[in-house]
Amino acid sequence: MRPSEIREAAAALLGAHRSGTPIPPLSTTYPGATVADAYRIQQEQVRSWTEDGDQVRGHKIGLVSAAIQRQMGVHEPDYGHLTASMFHPEHRPIPARGFIQPRVEPEIAFVLGAPLRGPGVTADDARRSVRHLLPALEIVDSRIQDWRISIVDTIADNASSGAAILGSTPIDPAGVDLRSASCALLRNGMVTETGTGAAVLGTPFNALAWLANAIGALGVSLEPGQVVLSGSLTRAVTIAPGDSITADFPGIGRVTAVLADGEDFP
């Protein structure tokens, strides 16, 4: 894509964020767009957000399961940026008007205690870099009409990011077997999905290592204090105003998010 098209596509997604009106798939509007183009579109939006005063606080990893990768026709995950405005305290109502077509996923969040920079980062390196982990919920959203996304669309749309809700009790990663860690996702008190850490590239630490190597190729490192959402342990669940969602990770903790009706927020 030409630089002017990159800016045009980023402006369309930024407009969808502001208006709440989704746009047609970028992969249709720009049929020759590549994954590299999509990351450039993503970066253009991040630049706009930071210029407006937001701050990058970390990253999210998507497409971690083999089934989703086959569905999207890719062989590796993708990533997006997490900015300060995307984080919401658990239990405090989150205004539904901030989303277009939200879904929720349970994830393990890592808070880094040491820098991590690829290439060559291993899962053991990743584990050693983590200060603590937290149970987390990610609200994913799409600025693309009806979630009709290709790999180009989701990457360009900041990996379909929406919001992050972190648990409040830090867990020392030492001795935690995230591969076998289990999770139940509850909507309004009823279990809707279950999964284990093995769904995340075998273990969430593999996902963290992948991210460090992927952005390391661009000369970027993960820094202490940054948060990484490592990918969903289950399928995403559609949510609506009024829903209360809980991710329960036995031995790790629970985290709850409430999507509030619009009239609760003037």
Image: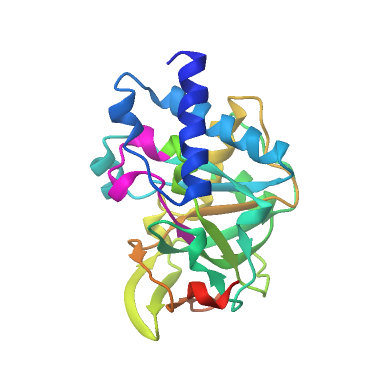
Position of residue 137 relative to residue 29, above or below, is below
Depth order, front residue of 208/246: 246
Q: Position of residue 241 (x, y in %)?
A: 43, 73
In the visual, does 107 lie left or right of 26? right
Residue 176, quarter of picture: bottom right
Q: Give yes or no for residue 1 being in the magenta stretch.
A: no
- Residue at figure coordinates x 36%, y 43% from the top left: 144
Position of residue 168 relative to residue 108, above or below, is below
Q: Residue furthest left?
A: 71
Number of on-image labels: 0
Q: Position of residue 152 (x, y in %)?
A: 37, 32
Q: Which residues are magenta?
A: 138-154
Q: Is residue 258 in view?
A: no
Position of residue 216 relative to residue 246, above or below, is above
Residue 1, quarter of picture: top left
Quadrant in which the C terminus appears? bottom right
Depth order, front residue of 78/133: 78
Q: Position of residue 206 (x, y in %)?
A: 49, 47
- Residue at figure coordinates x 44%, y 61% from the top left: 179
Depth order, front residue of 224/100: 100
